[in-house]
Amino acid sequence: MQTVKHRTPDALSRSILELNSDTISVRKAEVAVKNLTNIITAALKLSNSKGFQAMSLRDLSKEAGMSMGGLYAYFDSKTTLLNMILTQVTQAVEDVLTNPPEDVTQDPVAHLDWLIDAHIRLTEEMLAWFAFSFMEAKNFPAKQRQIAIDSEIMTEDLFAQVICRAQAKGLLRHDASPLLPALIKPLLQDWYVKRAKYRKRGVSVADYIKTVQSFVRAACLQVDTAP
């Protein structure tokens, strides 16, 4: 069940440009998008190898093949760059998970399956962005760390709301643990945090989605409603 619109690096950079047009000094949109894509790709690569906190703007300048002045045309500090990245991640999660197809919302169990599918496919498309947000969160400044926490809470709340609707309709066991939404989140995160492990084992995104859906269903479905 494909639910995620195509989020290419250029499309994400274009979104960054639109949201920060008042501070980015480069006026030619195509040039700005190309350079933003280059900068973000370099920043995520360096963060993966040495950590965002340890990465200097001089490191980024060298990796991106741009002058320090060129970088400052797009952001004034690492914190601003961090905000650009986090905003795209949190906005993508909200845009996708809060807009399910109308036919899905009629059936809470189908909605639950859809949430799992949509989240995992989104993280597959934005793999480096999500891995960065998860792995680096502990080193974020307080404000940015709270943004990451709020996004995680929003995701759990969406799952909790659907689970409550399913319980109210008698589709899920009423004794299903209230911790279930919090336990689902690590299953979603494992896909992008340990992606190399699943790639080595030949596990496809579709297989992983199906496994998580089956696991969650087994944990909370009424026995007589299980497929």
Image (tube, rainbow, N blue to C red):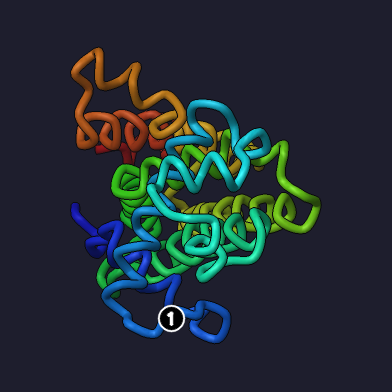
Decide which of 223, 195 is in the foreground and name it: 195
The answer to whether residue 184 is seen in the rendering is yes
Q: Residue at x 53, y 33 (%)?
A: 186
Q: Quadrant of the C terminus?
A: top left
Identified by mark 1, the residue type is Glu
Q: Residue at x 48, y 57 (%)?
A: 89
Q: Up-down: is 102 above or below 156?
A: below
Q: Up-down: is 103 above or below 203?
A: below
Secondary structure under badge 1?
Answer: helix
Rendering quarter of residue 133: top right
Mark 1 packing: few (<14 Cα in 10 Å), some, or many (20+)? few
Rendering quarter of residue 179: top right
**206 displayed left or right of 48:** left
Q: Residue at x 52, y 53 (%)?
A: 159
**Where's residue 94, x and y in %?**
48, 66
**Where's residue 215, x and y in %?**
39, 29
**Where's residue 146, x and y in %?**
74, 55
